Amino acid sequence: MVILPSNTPLKVLLNDKIIAFLELIRHSNKQPLINKLDIYRKINRAQLNNKIRILCLHGLVQNDNGVTLGLLLTYINYRHVTLLYIVEPETEVLLRER
């Protein structure tokens, strides 16, 4: 089992100046990782990232032994506005339409 330090950054700047979110991976079971990679492959093939703001896979973070430690995903600054908040009746129409 790989244990990462508690100060591991979750927001990282990639070489191409893209800001990414680091989603850490648990190593006890590989099937969830395989499922996630399959979903991101389908998103990439569907080219949804050109139409809507959606998480896309930018890369993997691996240790020297090739063990995957995390996924580098599109960073979406949601400013503490979640989908649950947006669908609340008192939320402004302009915010819902974004």
Image: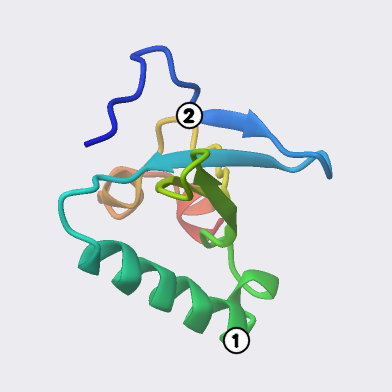
Residue 63 in the image: state x and y as whole percent: 49, 39
Residue lying furthest left in this view? 28
The kind of residue tagged 2 is: Leu
Q: Determine whether, in the image, residue 64 is placed left or right of residue 88.
A: right
Percent of width and height locating residue 20: 61, 41
Reading the image, the residue beneath label 1 is 45
The quadrant where residue 33 appears? bottom left
Question: Which one is nearer the viewer's eye here, 77 or 22?
Answer: 22
**What is the secondary structure assignment of the residue under circle 1?**
helix
The residue at which mark 2 appears reads as: 10
Q: Position of residue 14 (x, y in %)?
A: 73, 39
Looking at this view, is 93 or 39 the one in front?
A: 39
> What residue sits 30% from the left and 73% below the top?
35
Within 10 Å of disc 2 (Cα), the crowding (few <14, some 14-19, many 20+) is few
Residue lying at the far front of the rendered structure: 65
Residue type at tag 1? Arg
Residue plotted at (49% across, 83% down): 42
